[in-house]
Image (cartoon, rainbow, N blue to C red):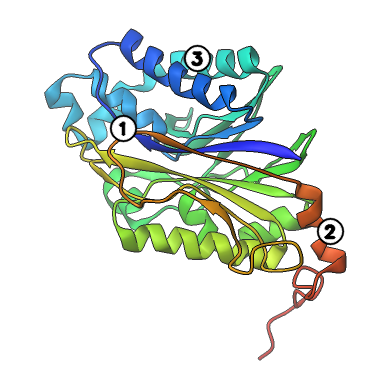
Amino acid sequence: MVKFAACQYALERFASWNEFATHFAALVDEAAASGAEIVLMPEYSAMALTGLLSDDLCADLHGSIAAIQPLLPEFLKLSEELARKHGIWFCPGSAPVLDPDDKFRNRAFLFGPDGPVGVQDKIVMTRFEREQWNIAAGVDGLNTFDTPFGKLGILICYDNEFPLLARRLAEEGVDLVLSPSCTDTEAGYYRVRIGAQARALENQFAVLVSPTAGHAPWSPAVDTNCGKAALYVPSDYGMPPSGVWCESEAVFTPTSRWLYGEIDLADVARLRHEGQVALFRHWPDQILP
């Protein structure tokens, strides 16, 4: 059995790094105090750092992501300290990171009780990322992470909408997919939700989603945010018929809120062998003409 916490994370603006860090740490402290062992925050959570910039730089779509690069090491240091302090598996979400090839990539991070575990880049970019923001696709493939609760994988937002990515993780033995997300419309939220539920069904694993929330009018990248935190599972023995293990109540919320729950991932994995259906085993080797 593992306890988890997924955040509907409101991107608030703070006057200083210390104010931001105090707020961020308090949020994670709250999740850890609930007993959560896996803690997930959303895609582009680090864009909250743009709120520390001047008004002109905040409003500059490309300039703002370049300007927060010197702040990212402190953000990651803080995330590591929180994971170590609470003995949790902590994904603080993702950030646009400038790589040595001078391209920005949307990178999620994972920390464990003993420090950094690894990273996962987003594989498929949305139109906004491709056409307006110039965020490049990840080139290092998909990673998996061993934990005491089972094997984890990460699919960032849009990546949930592409079945073969999740299939690769399933073939690697992943039990739980962490899905940090950032959507600005209800349609976007539902696309991620439908994709996450479909991936849970097809691969007979669980998908934990954490979205951005609220309004950040100072940022052209994450100005409007909506979505529900949720854990999705296959619709099968011992699972809710809807495939929704739990989810937050509202799509729109002005403040950060946690969704808490617990699940035995072995019960989900058992469905691959003992379920009413065997979607993982019955995956076709090729698409029929």
Residue at 22 percent of width and 13 percent of height: 15
Disc 1 to disc 3, C-alpha distance: 17 Å
Disc 2 to disc 3, C-alpha distance: 37 Å
* Mark 1 vs 3, N-terminal side: 1
**Residue 48 in view of the camera:** yes
Give percent across and percent down for residue 140.
62, 42
Relative to residue 163, is residue 137 depicted above or below?
Answer: above
Residue at the farthest right position: 273
Give percent across and percent down for residue 243.
61, 64
Within the image, what quadrant is residue 22 found in? top left
Disc 1 to disc 2, C-alpha distance: 38 Å
Q: Dot 1: few (<14), some (14–19), or many (≥20) neighbours within 10 Å?
A: many
Q: Is residue 97 left or right of residue 265?
A: left
Which residue corresponds to mark 2? 270
Q: Which corner quadrant holds the N terminus?
A: top right
Q: Secondary structure at mark 3?
A: helix
Name which residue type carries label 1.
Leu
Which residue corresponds to mark 1? 11
Q: Is residue 254 left or right of residue 165?
A: left
